[in-house]
Image (tube, rainbow, N blue to C red):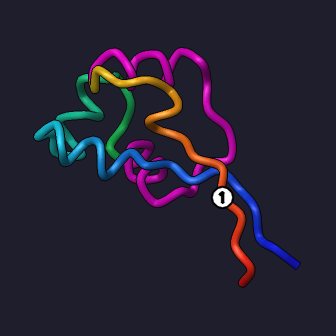
Amino acid sequence: MPIVGIYVKLKEIREARGFSQEGLARAVGVSLNTMQRWEYNLIRSASFDTLEKLCEVLECKVEDLLEWRRTNS
């Protein structure tokens, strides 16, 4: 059975924009632990406020951050 889910591409975008995890967490207004959970795809829900702030700080769109994936693993 295929595995499906939302993949968060935050690490790639963060690094391309020159942010550290801690710096981005501070700019977005979340804890470092929360930022790490985003990057390791461990979040189970996200507020629109957080998504909006991430997009604002990283100058990107929601679809740049999130991707729906299906694997045949």
| The furthest residue to the bottom | 73
- Residue 24's place in the image compared with 39, above or below, is above
On the image, the x and y values in percent for residue 65 come to: 46, 38
- Residue 63's place in the image compared with 68, above or below, is above
Dominant SS in magenta: helix
On the image, the x and y values in percent for residue 21 come to: 24, 46
- Looking at the rendering, which quadrant does residue 34 occupy? top left
Residue 52 in the magenta stretch? The answer is yes
> What residue is drawn where x is 38% and y is 30%?
30
| The furthest residue to the left | 18
Is 49 positioned to the left or the right of 13 in the image? right
Numbered-mark total? 1
Task: Identify which residue, 34 or 13, lies in the foreground.
Answer: 13
Residue 73 in the magenta stretch? The answer is no
Is 64 positioned to the left or the right of 15 in the image? right
Q: Quadrant of the N terminus?
A: bottom right
Q: Which residues are magenta?
A: 33-57
> How many neighbours does mark 1 have within 10 angstroms: few (below 14), some (14-19), or many (20 or more)?
few
- Looking at the rendering, which quadrant does residue 22 occupy? top left
- Residue 33's place in the image compared with 48, above or below, is below
Task: Identify which residue, 71 or 20, lies in the foreground.
Answer: 71
Name the kind of residue labelled 1 in the image.
Arg
> What residue is drawn where x is 50% and y is 49%?
8
- Residue 73's place in the image compared with 40, above or below, is below
> What residue is drawn where x is 30% and y is 51%?
12
> What residue is drawn where x is 24% and y is 34%?
24
On the image, the x and y values in percent for residue 10 come to: 38, 45
Is 59 positioned to the left or the right of 43 in the image? left
Q: Quadrant of the C terminus?
A: bottom right
Which residue position is annotated with label 1?
69
Secondary structure beneath dot 1 equals strand
